[in-house]
């Protein structure tokens, strides 16, 4: 009986934030009309998918005891680039007047190449120059933001083509108020892809090995430098995809698209079991963490909590999640 009690206490302490947020969601669902409705669920899931994609990119960095503070700015750059090439031909205020209409896939590839380049730079600075990930990606965050300002002129960009915006708004089918959107399908495909990458490939094996013990991994024959470069480059690719989809969802983009999304991603990963001390993390946990964090924000909106206080609560959740993660790490030692 004592062993069973210890297991229960251990489970509750390790999942305290998730359990508390589930209770909050249950309370809001019982007291606020419309919270447990199809349209609200659609709205939540539409917000979850781009954030899940960003969190997938950040998770790889966290698992190797790194981080990526440039994620949000790369998302913004990706969104702005996409919008400048995917405006309607009849839109009066086009960014590139007279530009031909390019296929969506061609523009997506361009966006991915741009953000992957900055992810590659992150990986090289961190693994070759040995700059701590926090400082390297903080510097890259500012660089990417500056480049985005220069490129866009700090002006919002709209007038997007319908085939582009339908990626976020279009649906495959609808059942009782719930619409299964193309966006959901993209999120599912990327989630499965990353599960395979983390669990069935050398990429994932090396990633967990580096996060568990970098020196031991190197002695075992892992090319730590190349692996980190790959990890940050893949993260950059994910930010580009997320920016591409977020701009379609928003119907436009500006330099502030994706602002502070990296902090949400780090919090969601930590809530979902990705350890900031490295070597631990699952795709299913990342999805759960993103969903729980989004439900927290939606619950506060339904409770009509002032936006200023919402930021305070979100910040507190981030601090508590990281503190609990470090506590678990110290307990294991």
Image (spheres, helix red, strand yellow):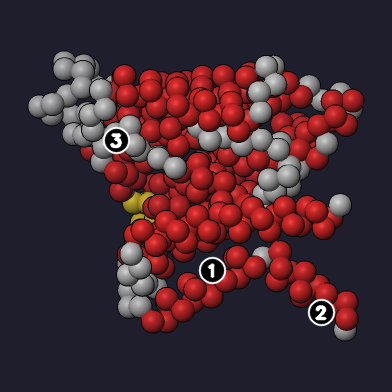
Q: Whole-Å distance between the Cαs marked 2 and 3?
A: 52 Å
Q: Nearer the viewer, residue 170 or 60?
A: 60
Residue drawn 41% across and 68% down? 299
Task: Return the x and y of residue 112 as percentages of the image width and height.
Answer: 46, 25
Crowding around mark 3 (Cα neighbors within 10 Å: few <14, some 14 to 19, many 20+) is: many
Left or right of 251, for residue 68: right
Q: Earlier in the sequence, mark 3 or mark 1?
A: 1
Outermost residue, bottom direction? 1
Residue 79 appears in the figure: yes
Q: Earlier in the sequence, mark 1 or mark 2?
A: 2
Up/down of 333 relative to 198, above or below: below
Residue 176 appears in the figure: no
Question: What is the quadrant of the N terminus in the image?
Answer: bottom right
Whether pointer 2 and pointer 3 mark residues with C-beta atoms closer than 8 Å, the reply is no
Residue named by callout 2 = 5
Q: Which mark is residue 327?
A: none
Residue drawn 53% across and 68% down? 21
Task: Return the x and y of residue 236 as percentages of the image width and height.
Answer: 53, 29
Crowding around mark 2 (Cα neighbors within 10 Å: few <14, some 14 to 19, many 20+) is: few
Up/down of 166 relative to 228, above or below: below
Residue named by callout 1 = 21
Residue named by callout 3 = 253
Residue drawn 82% across and 58% down? 331
Task: Return the x and y of residue 105 as percentages of the image width and height.
Answer: 39, 27
């Amino acid at each position: 009986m004592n062993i069973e009690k210890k297991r229960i206490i251990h489970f509750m302490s390790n999942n305290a934030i998730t359990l508390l947020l589930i209770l909050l969601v249950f309370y809001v669902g019982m007291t606020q009309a419309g919270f447990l409705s199809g349209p609200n669920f659609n709205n939540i899931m539409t917000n979850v998918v781009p954030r899940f994609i960003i969190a997938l990119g950040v998770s790889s960095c966290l698992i190797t005891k790194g981080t990526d503070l440039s994620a949000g700015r790369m998302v913004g750059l990706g969104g702005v680039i996409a919008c400048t090439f995917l405006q309607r031909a009849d839109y009066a205020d086009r960014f590139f007047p007279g530009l031909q209409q390019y296929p969506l896939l061609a523009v997506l590839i361009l966006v991915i190449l741009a953000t992957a380049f900055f992810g590659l730079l992150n990986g090289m600075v961190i693994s070759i120059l040995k700059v701590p990930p926090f400082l390297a990606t903080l510097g890259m965050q500012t660089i990417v933001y500056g480049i985005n300002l220069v490129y866009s002129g700090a002006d919002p960009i709209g007038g997007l083509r319908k085939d582009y915006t339908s990626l976020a708004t279009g649906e495959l089918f609808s059942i009782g108020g719930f619409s299964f959107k193309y966006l959901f399908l993209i999120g599912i495909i990327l989630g499965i892809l990353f599960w395979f990458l983390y669990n069935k490939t050398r990429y994932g094996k090396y990633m967990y090995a580096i996060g568990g013990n970098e020196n031991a991994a190197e002695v075992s024959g892992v090319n730590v430098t190349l692996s980190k470069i790959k990890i940050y480059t893949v993260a950059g690719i994910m930010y580009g995809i997320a920016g591409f989809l977020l701009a379609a969802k928003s119907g436009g983009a500006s330099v502030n698209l994706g602002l502070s999304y990296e902090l949400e991603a780090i919090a969601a990963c930590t809530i979902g079991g990705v350890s900031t001390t490295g070597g631990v993390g699952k795709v299913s946990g990342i999805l759960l963490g993103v969903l729980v964090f989004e439900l927290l924000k939606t619950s506060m909106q339904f409770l009509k909590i002032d936006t200023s206080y919402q930021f305070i609560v979100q910040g507190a959740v981030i601090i508590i999640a990281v503190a609990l993660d470090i506590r678990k790490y110290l307990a294991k030692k």
